[in-house]
Amino acid sequence: MTASKPAAPAAELFDYLLRLADNGLVLAQRLGEWVGKGPVLEEDIASTNVGLDLLGQARLWLAYAGEVQAIDGAPSRSEDDLAYFRDSRDFRNLLLVEQPNGNYGDTIARQFLFDQWHVLLLGQLTLSRDERIAGIAAKAVKEVRYHVERSADWVVRLGDGTATSHERMQAAVDALWTYTGEMFAVDATERTLIDAGIAADGAALLPAWQSSVQAVLDEATIVIPADPFMQGARSRGGKQGIHTEHLSRLLAEMQVLPRSMPDARW
Amino acid sequence: MVTSSVTHPPVREDATLADARAAIWRALGGIVDPEIPTVSIVELGIVRDVARASDAWIVTVTPTYSGCPATRIIEADIRTAIGAVIGEDVRIVTALAPAWTTDWIAPEGRLKLREAGIAPPHAATLGAVQAHPVTFRRPREPVRCPNCGSLRTTELARFGSTACKAQYRCTECLEPFDFFKPH
């Protein structure tokens, strides 16, 4: 597929593509940490498969980002360059996805809150005026449908499970809730692209996300945290490159090999 | 090999091209998916087109899942197989849109899946993707056991040995099996 001419400034588009890419890249890395030590074999396999899907999607977004950057005259960077040779301040993922795995309930809660948003986001992006974005989204949304089905199932299974699993699932949702606001906050970068018909309007996704999340949490006997604080639309976070300390540690592990041996081949 | 339409009469040219094209399709039909080695990449609907450009043959493929590790192996297999048939390098174009769907799996491919103990996918519900929020209790179409044909089956896990499959179990013959998920 050839790059369709973006109708928006390349700088904004590049930044937005990094947001899409880095969510998948960082979450895939987190899920990879479970390989070989999942709580049951089926879940070990499932979390790895979800990670693989997200990594594959991240590669598509990064490849496009590298091409878009070249439009402004900057040297084109490959997906590997972008994945391995950017520092945490240059990453654009949501704070939610960089949070540590914790116990399996924490991992599932993080996945569930993200998946429910991701499926809505990609659904909207299938309508993007940028054909390349629409094409990647149409492919990815089918994969993410399965992700959200699985994570929703597990939220219910753990939330409505034993006293201990319930307690942990509730604690996980309580702890992660604060990071969800960022998914719906629209900054100037996104506003420009939304107006150009390229990006999805995060604020418009909120009602559908809330009702889906509420329905599953009700089923799981989990209550939405009483403290309604979510990051506001004007605050800065992962999408602007302001991260929690967890990201640097994750990147250190993910990037060490290509940085110490740039010519290493698999 | 065919070079240009100037040096050959059009009829002969077409016949040669058609022969080469047919040979390429036959070669592609002999390449199996490395993760489902009984079904060819043509039967899976991965190969979308074979076309002749001025300087090379172009094979258009559509990857199944974004992170499918088989994609690179399939591309290498295509190069090897076609190189052996036409004696020249082939250009592989990856098309993302329209996105691959299990609805493209040919009837013979479905049959082979079942024979390999993998329940073939139902029709994928395209277009419904955006409309439905995902909640806990979803209606699920029953999956037929590839071993005994019973519909009394139950899902063990949403993901199986590969991203494209789920793990099921038959409560009639008690055999576990893979289900190729509608996609």
Image: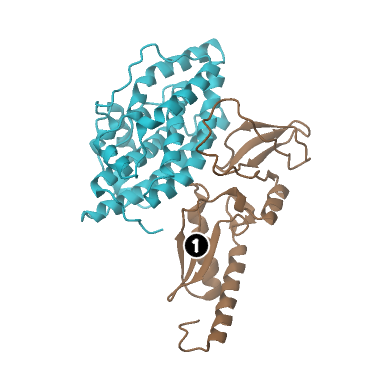
Q: Chain of mark 1?
A: B
Instruction: Give the residue displayed 73% in from the left and 49% down from the top.
Output: B115
User: Could one spot residue A98 in this view of the protein?
Assistant: no
Instruction: Give the residue displayed 77% in from the left and 37% down from the top.
Output: B150
Instruction: Give the residue displayed 46% in from the left and 15% down from the top.
Output: A170
Colouring style: by chain
Q: Secondary structure at mark 1?
A: strand
| Residue A111, x across and y down, in percent | 45, 29
* Colour-to-chain, brown: B
Q: Nearer the viewer, residue A153 or A191?
A: A191
Q: Nearer the viewer, residue A233 or B167?
A: A233
| Residue B58, x across and y down, in percent | 48, 68
* Chain A visual colour: cyan
Q: Nearer the viewer, residue A206 or B14?
A: A206
User: Could one spot residue B26 in this view of the protein?
Assistant: yes
Residue to which mark 1 is pinned:
B60
Q: Is residue B19 left or right of residue A7?
A: right
- Quarter where residue B149 is shown: top right
Q: Is residue A123 left or right of residue B126?
A: left
Q: Residues within 10 Å of mark 1 (few under 14, many from 20)?
A: some
| Residue A255, x across and y down, in percent | 31, 41
State which quarter of the image contains the N terminus of chain A: bottom left
